[in-house]
Image (cartoon, rainbow, N blue to C red):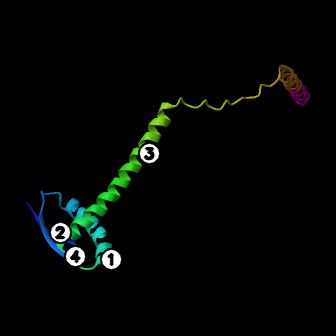
């Protein structure tokens, strides 16, 4: 088991962990140190147990707040999932009236007839 030196509140501690978990231990120690620093700034030098207790309580408070927010967000997601899906917007494609289609077909037929006559005159 590797033994690591971590620093919390300006004090060094030697802690053992499993192989491969070193980065988790360093991350946890950094979080605890982040909570300890303002406590030491406000209260001055404290005995190790009290400093660690205060920092741990501050971290636990922050964790509890995050867990509450997560619970609320999960409830909102569950509520949204329970609602029926909103009706999709209906897209209407305008229909070309038959008269217009017939007129265009007639114009096309006339144009083709004119083109055919011009071809005949050229030949």
Q: Are marks 2 and 3 in contact (CB under 8 Å)?
A: no
* Mark whose residue sits in front, 4 or 3: 4
| Above/below status of 88 relative to 2 | above
Seen at 68% across and 31% down, the residue is: 91
* Mark whose residue sits in front, 2 or 3: 2
Residue indicated by mark 2: 49
Q: Using the image, tell me which numbered label, if any, was put on residue 93.
A: none
Seen at 87% across and 21% down, the residue is: 99
Q: Position of residue 9 (x, y in %)?
A: 24, 74
Location of residue 85 (image quadrant): top right
Mark 4 or 3 closer to N-term? Answer: 4
Seen at 29% across and 58% down, the residue is: 60
CA gap, disc 2 to disc 4? 8 Å
Q: Using the image, tell me which numbered label, if any, was put on residue 73.
A: 3
Label 1 neighbour load within 10 Å: few <14, some 14-19, many 20+: few
Location of residue 65 (image quadrant): bottom left
Question: Residues in magenta?
Answer: 111-123
4 lies left or right of 89: left
């Amino acid at each position: 088991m590797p033994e690591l030196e971590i620093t919390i509140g300006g004090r060094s501690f030697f802690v053992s962990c499993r192989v491969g978990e070193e980065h988790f231990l360093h991350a946890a120690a950094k979080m605890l140190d982040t909570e300890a620093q303002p406590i030491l700034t406000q209260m001055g030098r404290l005995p190790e147990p009290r400093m660690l207790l205060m920092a741990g309580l501050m971290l636990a408070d922050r964790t509890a707040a995050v867990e509450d927010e997560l619970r609320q967000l999960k409830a909102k997601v569950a509520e949204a999932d329970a609602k029926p899906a909103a009706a999709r917007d209906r897209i209407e494609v305008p229909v070309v009236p038959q008269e217009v289609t017939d007129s265009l077909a007639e114009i096309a037929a006339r144009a083709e007839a004119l083109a055919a006559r011009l071809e005949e005159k050229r030949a």
